[in-house]
Image: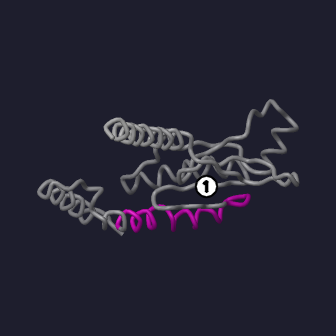
């Protein structure tokens, strides 16, 4: 969609607009739409083509600029990661190294880890505010489970406690004065 001079003109205009109005770039609502369209062409369409070359099954889950890619075969994951890095570089984008990892995940991974403990623990990943992990139902069926991301949960609990403390101080002050 955006390439060459148009890409530069658009982003220069956007930065100028942000500087002159004093509004941060993130607050321009249409930026998210353009970013999503840009990622659709630079990432989404390419990934759908690339998945055809995989030896095993490939699962793609994408929301805005976040994505989770699941591969049945380890080598498919390695190949896709290398090709994706190159693809995004062509568009002036890069994958955040601290937010990208290859993990064992899924029912097959659970069985493999249980039969051979040297493979280590199963992986977990954070996506859309939840930590995803493999677990079992009471019926012993293997399922993907989710819990609120720990950092977010702690921050929320702190906000609640602060709110309680403020309410207590306000109410306690009124009782003492009354």
Q: Residue 39: horizontal and vertical position, in percent?
A: 43, 62
Answer above or below: position of 36 versus 71: below
Q: Nearer the viewer, residue 148 or 124?
A: 148
Q: Nearer the viewer, residue 40 or 137?
A: 137
User: Are there few (<14), some (14-19), or many (20+) residues within 10 Å of tag 1?
Assistant: some
Report the residue that reaches farthest toward the front. Answer: 178
Image position of 32 (left or right of 150): left
Question: Chief secondary structure of the magenta span?
Answer: helix
Q: Quadrant of the C terminus?
A: top left
Answer above or below: position of 168 versus 108: above
Residue 53 appears in which quarter of the rendering?
Answer: bottom right
Q: Secondary structure at mark 1?
A: strand
Image position of 96 (left or right of 134): left
Asked whether residue 21 is drawn in magenta, I would say no
Report the residue that reaches farthest toward the top. Answer: 118
Residue 60 appears in which quarter of the rendering?
Answer: bottom right
Span of residues in magenta: 34-58
Answer above or below: position of 159 versus 24: above
Q: Residue 79: horizontal and vertical position, in percent?
A: 61, 50
**Label 1 sits on residue:** 69
């Amino acid at each position: 969609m955006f390439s060459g001079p148009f890409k530069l003109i658009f982003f220069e205009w956007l930065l100028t607009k942000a500087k002159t109005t004093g509004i941060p770039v993130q607050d321009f609502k249409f930026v998210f739409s353009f970013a999503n369209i840009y990622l659709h062409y630079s990432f989404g369409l390419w990934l759908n083509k690339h998945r055809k070359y995989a030896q095993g099954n490939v699962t793609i889950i994408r929301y805005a600029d976040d994505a989770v890619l699941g591969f049945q075969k380890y080598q498919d994951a390695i190949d896709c990661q290398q090709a994706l890095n190159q693809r995004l570089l062509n568009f002036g984008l890069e994958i955040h190294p601290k937010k990208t990892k290859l993990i064992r995940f899924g029912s097959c991974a659970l069985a493999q880890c249980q039969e051979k403990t040297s493979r280590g623990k199963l992986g977990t990943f954070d996506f859309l505010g939840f930590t995803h992990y493999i677990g079992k139902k009471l019926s012993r069926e293997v399922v993907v489970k989710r819990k609120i991301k720990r950092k977010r949960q702690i921050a929320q609990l702190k906000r609640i406690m602060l709110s309680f403390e403020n309410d207590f101080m306000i109410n306690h002050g009124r009782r003492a004065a009354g």
